[in-house]
Amino acid sequence: MSKLANKLDKLLALGWLVFWPVVLSGVNVAVWFWLRKAGISLYIAGDEGVMTSGTSALLFTIYGLLTALICVTVWNQWEAVQSAVKTVDEAKFREYKDKRLPLPLKLVMLMFSLFIVFAFHLMTYRNVLDGAYTSFVVAMALSLPWFVIMDLDNPFTGYWNVKGKIPPEWMKD
């Protein structure tokens, strides 16, 4: 593969890594806007203070800690595979090549993401642009780390990958 084709492949992978969070954020804004236009009241007037100072802050704290832990885990596993390839350590490569995040951990992260999005849907905004902006930013802040983690979880696909550098016989089980 030529260097130009490799760089284009990397750029395309990076574009998809950013594209999907933007799409999800746009969908989130559309849902929020539809709820507002439909007159569906998801909040009790006067309770926004409890939501902003208590519930959403707690959810964001837990989500942030969980995301940081997961990011460190997948980065260390990705780095172990990359290091094994660079140092030609087949035993280390075989030890780490199939390690992935467990599904229940991914589901917990997804659950907290949905709780946070719903918490921001519960709030009322006097200005539609404030609500749309908040919905978009919250969804981006939650989905971008998710897509980075999913990309790093498999060292052979996505933007961060080691696939072109691995001896073919190492991939056979």
Image (cartoon, grey):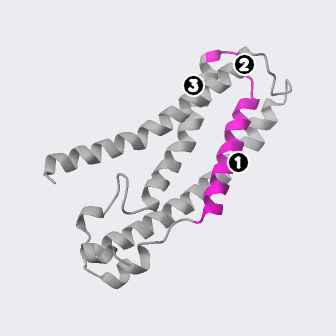
Return the residue found at the far bottom. Answer: 91
Pinpoint residue 37: horizontal percent, then vertical percent: 71, 14
Q: Which residues are magenta?
A: 102-128
The residue labelled by disc 3 is 133
Q: Kindly identify the amino acid type of the residue bearing the numbered disc 3.
A: Tyr
> In the rendered view, does 134 fall on the left or right side of 93?
right
Pinpoint residue 86: horizontal percent, then vertical percent: 25, 73
The N terminus - image quarter: bottom left
Identify the secondary structure beneath mark 3: helix
Q: Which mark is residue 36?
A: 2
Magenta-drawn stretch contains 108: yes
Q: Are marks 2 and 1 in contact (CB under 8 Å)?
A: no
Classify mark 2: residues with Cα within 10 Å, few (<14), some (14-19) or many (20+).
some
Q: Quadrant of residue 65?
A: bottom right
Q: Kindly identify the amino acid type of the residue bearing the numbered disc 2.
A: Arg
> In the rendered view, does 83 fall on the left or right side of 77?
left
The residue labelled by disc 1 is 59
| Mark positioned earlier in the residue sequence (1 or 3) | 1
Question: How far apart are labels 1 and 3 at the CA level?
Answer: 20 Å
Q: Are marks 2 and 3 in contact (CB under 8 Å)?
A: no
**Which circle, 2 or 1, is nearer the viewer?**
2
Q: State whether residue 49 is above or below residue 65.
A: above
Question: How far apart are labels 2 and 1 at the CA level?
Answer: 23 Å
